[in-house]
Image (tube, helix red, strand yellow):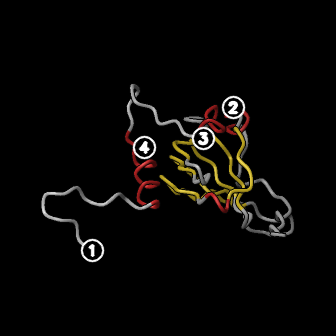
Amino acid sequence: MAPAAGSLSPAPSRRRRRLLLLHRALVRDDDHTLVDSAMATLGGYLNKKVLIVTADSRILVGTLTAADNSTNLVLNDAVERIIREPDDPEPSVEVPLGLYLVRGDGVCSVGLVDEKLDDSINWTEVKGATIGGVKHI
């Protein structure tokens, strides 16, 4: 049913409200900071370089810009690190992603990155075993 002429529009959906919260976090200035329960937990990581391991074994690194109650995370200057196995002749790679949204249901862990140590590593030479998948019980 359409709203009557001159009346207020209907309230935004839950999904739309979540997107608006993420948008506000991205466009906020120093005087207006968005804080919700997810940011209360991840607040110490805001505007810092983090590493995220996802449920599908991806490794993402970038600056944490925003988060919401569903642990959806926004990374700025994000890269995906694809680490090859020791017997693989191909070098490991870092794929630039730019501004990237990570869905909360796929987040396994989030950790701060020691930037000095991270910058000293040549990630194309790093080899390692594949991270196993996630089992939901």
Quick one: label 2 or label 1, which is nearer the N terminus? 1
Mark on residue 37?
3
Residue 121 image-quadrant placement = top right
Question: Given the image, on which type of amino acid does mark 3 rest?
Answer: Ser
- Report the residue marked by disc 2: 116
User: What amino acid does circle 4 point to?
Assistant: Leu
Label 4 crowding class (10 Å Cα cut-off): few <14, some 14-19, many 20+? some
How crowded pointer 1 is (Cα within 10 Å; few <14, some 14-19, many 20+) is rated as few
SS category of the residue bearing label 4: helix
Seen from the viewer's position, the closer of residues 118 and 34 is: 34
Disc ID at residue 1: 1
Secondary-structure class at tag 1: loop
Q: Residues within 10 Å of mark 3 (few under 14, many from 20)?
A: few
Q: Is residue 28 left or right of residue 104?
A: left
71, 94: nearer the viewer? 71
Q: Which residue is mark 4?
A: 26
**Mark closer to the chain start, 4 or 3:** 4
Q: Is residue 12 left or right of residue 45?
A: left
Q: Amino acid at mark 2?
A: Lys
In front of the other: label 1 or label 3?
1
Q: Residue at x 35, y 57 (%)?
A: 11
Identified by mark 1, the residue type is: Met
Lateral position of residue 26 relative to residue 127, left or right: left
Q: Earlier in the sequence, mark 2 or mark 4?
A: 4
**How far is the residue under mark 2 from the one under mark 4?**
26 Å
Residue nearest the observer in this picture, 15 or 26: 15
For marks 2 and 3, give the CA distance: 30 Å
Asked where in the image residue 113 lies, by quadrant, the reply is top right
In percent of the image, x 68 and y 47: which residue is there? 51
Spot occupied by residue 5 in the image (x, y as percentages of width and height): 13, 63
Sequence-first disc among 2 and 3? 3
Residue 19 at x, y = what percent? 43, 55
